[in-house]
């Protein structure tokens, strides 16, 4: 069922030091750009500075979980927003890409403890996709950023009551692990794929 995500109540305090990442898939890039804008606007209106939000591009939605996983394990981010657009084609590729992206993103969130949210559009037509990228049915990127903010706040709210876990750089209470940075888009990631 199509619908807008509910507006979440945010915590009043959000340290300016929190950093977030957006991972964006280049496939259907024109629509994805709208999701990136929606996510950036959500961070901005929550008081997170533009310089505290990193944008990383990957070739397609299938690659989102891998990039998110690397980013989460740097320990530098309080939350990661994955955005992409999967539009049904003539082959089962649609199902594979959408399913693996969703399962992979969930896995990253659970395995790393870093809120990693699902800002993907899965649509039957390009028109449906535009409607979910700032059109009549909201903006999935904005909603995913709201979810990441909410989860980052919530994690902070359940940690540190005994004074522990307050020193991690990402605000989640988890120390960063292997510093496998993905600050550069993978080779070939800058190529733009057209909509099908
Ligand atoms: C191959 C493919 C297809 C058919 N459709 C989409 C899509 O609708 N949205 C998307 O983000 N990516 C698509 N891709 C690309 C895959 O995500 C992936 O980049 C390639 O299969 C290489 O692993």
Image (cartoon, rainbow, N blue to C red):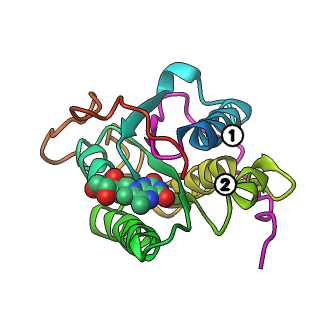
Q: Which mark is residue 195?
A: none
* Relative height, residue 85 to residue 33 (above, below): below
Q: Is residue 101 magenta?
A: no
* In this rendering, position of residue 82 left or right of residue 128: left
How many other residues sit within 10 Å of disc 1, few (<14), some (14-19) or many (≥20)?
many
Query: Quadrant location of the N terminus?
Result: bottom right
Nearer to the camera, 33 or 166 = 33
Nearer to the camera, 164 or 195 = 195
| Circle 2/circle 1 CB separation < 8 Å | yes
Residue hosting label 2: 140
Judged from this view, the residue extending furthest toward the front is 90
* In this rendering, position of residue 119 left or right of residue 130: left
Q: What residue range appears in magenta?
A: 1-28
Is most of the magenta stretch helix, strand or loop?
A: loop
Q: Secondary structure at mark 1?
A: helix
Q: Which quarter of the figure has residue 77?
A: top left
Q: Secondary structure at mark 2?
A: helix
Percent across and percent down for residue 160 are 42, 55
Percent across and percent down for residue 12 are 72, 44
Judged from this view, the residue extending furthest toward the left is 178
Residue hosting label 1: 38
Distance CA(mark 2)–CA(mark 1): 8 Å
């Amino acid at each position: 069922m199509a619908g807008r995500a509910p507006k979440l109540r945010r915590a009043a305090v959000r340290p300016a030091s929190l950093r977030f990442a957006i991972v964006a898939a280049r496939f259907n890039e024109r629509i994805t750009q709208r999701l990136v804008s929606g996510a950036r606007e959500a961070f901005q209106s929550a008081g997170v500075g533009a310089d505290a939000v990193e944008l990383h591009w990957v070739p397609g939605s299938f690659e989102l979980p891998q990039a998110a996983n690397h980013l989460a394990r740097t320990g530098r981010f309080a939350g990661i927003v994955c955005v992409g657009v999967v539009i049904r084609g003539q082959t089962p590729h649609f199902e594979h890409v959408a399913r693996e992206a969703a399962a992979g993103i969930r896995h990253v969130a659970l395995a790393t403890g870093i809120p990693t949210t699902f800002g993907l559009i899965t649509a039957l037509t390009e028109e449906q996709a535009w409607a979910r990228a700032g059109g009549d049915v909201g903006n999935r990127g904005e909603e995913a950023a709201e979810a990441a903010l909410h989860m980052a706040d919530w994690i902070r709210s359940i940690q540190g009551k005994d004074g522990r876990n307050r020193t991690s750089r990402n605000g989640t209470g988890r120390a960063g692990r292997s510093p496998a940075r993905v600050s550069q888009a993978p080779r070939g990631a800058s190529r733009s794929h057209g909509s099908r």
